[in-house]
Amino acid sequence: MNIAVFSAKRYDREYLQSAFDSRHRATFIEAQLSPASAELASGHDAVCAFVNDNLSRETLTVLARLGVRVVALRCTGFNNVDLAAARQLGIRIARVPAYSPHAVAEHTIALILALNRKLHRAFNRVRESNFSLEGLIGFDLHGKTVGIVGTGAIGQVVARILIGFGCEVIACDPAPNDHCRQLGVRYVSWDEVCRNSRIISLHCPLTTQTRHLVDATAIQKMNPGVMLVNTSRGAVVDTRALIDGLKRKRIGSLALDVYEEEAHLFFDDLSDRIVDDDVFARLLTFPNVLITGHQGFFTHEALTKIATTTCENLTAFEMTGAPVHEVPADLGTSVISTAPL
Ligand code: NAD
């Protein structure tokens, strides 16, 4: 098949080309997918898209007109897809349901450890021959209560690692699982996660139910000084409420790998430009905030699995008319980003 790969970076080209081999022909397009750039898919049967590509009704309508019949997402989340529009337009949506939960879970743990022991500050100090320890006090993870929101593939691995550290792990999930219970995870309500956790780590998908789950009301319920970690999707938290919580010292520290408006920022080198997002700029001013640019998934193993599963989806669609891992068109929970792209 002819595949238009949007938001393509050098590493996408490397891993996808190796997986596609001679089975599919790919055109790598640096631009994000949007209603304006969708025309670039002309002459292709399939589109391959990533987390910040815009798959709104407007974009999908252009793709359908061009004859695109399948969109292979090279990610797990599908919150950026208007599934109802895809169904009406006859475009099948495929995704990579699991690649390496370890990649994201281990990044989450890296953020927790770095933020707690203030490695981001210590690194800079030592480079400047400043060996003062003032302001670098952390806390033992051992014995602390960690609240996990969403105990799916990633949340489970995070729970297992934290239990290894000697943490007490509580969790909330509308679909609790026995594996977590056997690990020693105690399921409680979201309210109790807020009230009882020293650290809260988010691992749920972005849906209409989870959008701004962490808002001013939730922050008010949390233990003063709570550490909050979000490696799920940016809009699961209300960023303005986080800033207010940080200013009022309700939130003791914050680690983000995802950001509500990341589509304008992440995955590109903007170091010689002015960042005009004042909310993001404000976040960067806090010494107790650690941000990475959506790199939780970024390991060799994950990229290999993403590429092979994407290839399997496209090959299956070509042979049978259905991708292996199709996002059911009747899943009414997707949330379309309102961010202009
Ligand atoms: P998963 O589908 O295996 O697990 C998600 C879990 O969240 C499920 O158990 C589900 O029941 C639960 N859930 C749903 N609604 C909830 C709610 N309201 N409250 C609490 N739990 C709820 O997904 P996963 O593979 O573990 O991935 C989790 C999320 O991590 C993805 O949806 C994606 O947004 C994000 N992610 C981020 C990166 C990254 O690079 N930072 C990479 C992959 C995935």
Image: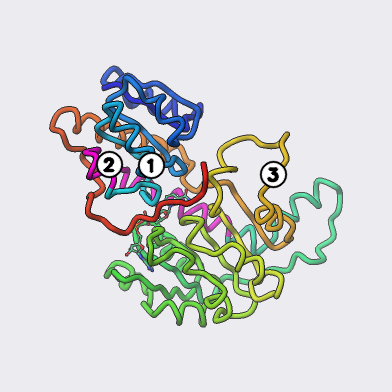
- In this view, the mark in front (2 or 1): 1
Is residue 114 inside the magenta stretch? Answer: no
What x and y, as percent, mark residue 19? Answer: 33, 27
Q: Which residue is mark 3?
A: 275
Residue 39 shown left or right of residue 121 in the figure: left
Magenta stretch: give its range. Answer: 85-111
| Label 1 residue near ligand 1, CB within 8 Å | no
**Against 62, is 185 above or below?**
below
What x and y, as percent, mark residue 321? Answer: 15, 33
What x and y, as percent, mark residue 177? Answer: 28, 68
Q: Which residue is mark 1?
A: 55
Residue found 57% across the figure and 74% down from its top: 216
Is residue 102 inside the magenta stretch? Answer: yes
Please rate how many residues cluster around mark 3, counting C-alpha atoms within 10 Å: few if below 14, some from 14 to 19, many from 20. Answer: few
Q: Tag 1: residue type? A: Leu
Q: CA distance from mark 3 to mark 1?
A: 25 Å
Q: Which residue is mark 2?
A: 93
Tell me which image quadrant ligand 1 sits in: bottom left
Marks 2 and 1, the one that precedes in the sequence = 1
Give yes or no for contact between labels 2 and 1 (Cβ–Cβ under 8 Å): yes
Residue found 20% across the figure and 32% down from its top: 317
Q: Nearer the viewer, residue 39 or 78?
A: 39
Please rate how many residues cluster around mark 2, counting C-alpha atoms within 10 Å: few if below 14, some from 14 to 19, many from 20. Answer: many
Q: Secondary structure at mark 3?
A: loop
Residue 26 shown left or right of residue 245 in the figure: left
**Residue at the left extreme?**
320
